[in-house]
Image (tube, grey):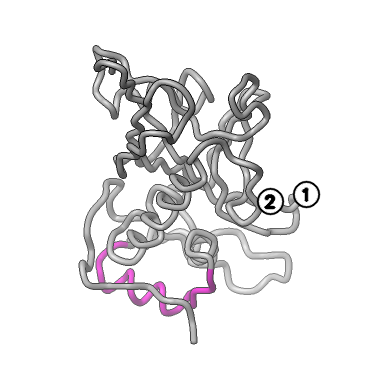
Amino acid sequence: MPNGNTLHEVLTAVFQVRNVNEDPEVDNPELCVLLWQRALQPERGAWSLPGGLLREDEDMTTSARRQLAEKVDVRGVAHLEQLSVFSEPNRVPGVRLIASTFLGLVPLDADPDLPTDTAWHPVSALPRTAFDHGVVLTHARTRLAAKLSYTNIAFALAPHEFTMSTLREIYCAALGYQVDATNLQRVLGRRGVLVATGATAPPGPSGGRPPALYRFAESRLRVTDEFAALRPPG
């Protein structure tokens, strides 16, 4: 919003766990972030978080959702929350631009139809990012990892129904380290986060007992254990 020589933009770090293996038959799930490539200077060719200027007639959440829909054609964000404000005077060239940032999450089974200048990038292998967007992205991922410990936020990354194996892969990808499936099921069950559907998934290629299907008890953010912290093994 214009205020003297200052403008206000809204940026959203949108994450999804995706299979980054070129062979769809081989699972290699990684946490990916949605970026679009700048076609104009400054920072032409660098990759940016989706966003743009806040309009005078909208709040920041409305602006974030509008720009995800208009600029990168993403409307299926299962969770959206405001993060921080980045206000370093020289964060971008030219007129001072303050950024309010958001965290957005897309479920594993969603496949948005993206424009040609937009793509998912594994957070483990990011391209060159514009301005301070790499810092914003890192802050958003840190917030996500923290909330996986003490809230039910994984509901926004998971399909509506899933096996514990799939949920474990989601946690491992989002956290960046291995998580034991049995321990994860025990912890989430104790917190009342998961509900058994009574159904099973088809058995794997090697046969065996069909895995049970679960769903999250709620599809809105809830603190489940405010003092909990998931940590890497060892």
Foreground pick, 149 / 207: 149
Q: What residue occupies the far right of the structure in this picture?
A: 23
Q: Nearer the viewer, residue 131 or 120?
A: 131
The quadrant where residue 144 appears:
bottom left
4 relative to 127 in the view: left or right:
left
Task: Using the image as rendered, state which of residue 136 and residue 79 is in the foreground.
Answer: 136
Q: In front here: 103 or 183?
A: 103
Q: Are marks 2 and 1 in contact (CB under 8 Å)?
A: no
Spot occupied by residue 41 in the image (x, y as percentages of width and height):
61, 21
Relative to residue 180, is residue 25 depicted above or below?
above
The reply to whether residue 215 is in sight is no
Figure quadrant of residue 192: bottom left
The percent coordinates of residue 161 (x first, y second) are: 45, 52
Q: Which mark is residue 22?
A: 1
The residue at which mark 2 appears reads as 20
* Location of residue 107 in the rendering, given as x and y in whole percent from the top left corner: 47, 45
Crowdedness near tag 1: few (<14), some (14–19) or many (≥20) residues, C-alpha within 10 Å: few
- The magenta segment: 177-193
Residue 90 lies within the magenta run: no
Instruction: Please indicate whether residue 11 sits to the left or right of residue 123 in the image.
Output: left
Disc number placed over residue 42 in the picture, else none: none
Residue 65, x across and y down, in percent: 37, 26
Q: Residue at x 63, y 19 (%)?
A: 40
The amino acid type found where label 2 is placed reads Val
The 10 Å Cα crowd at callout 2, few under 14, some 14 to 19, many 20 or more, is some
Above or below, 172 relative to 45 = below
- Magenta includes 185? yes
Position above or below: 197 against 68: below
Residue at 62%, 44% in the rendered image: 121
Q: Given the image, on which type of amino acid does mark 1 rest?
A: Glu
In the image, what residue occupies the spot 30% across and 24% down?
A: 62
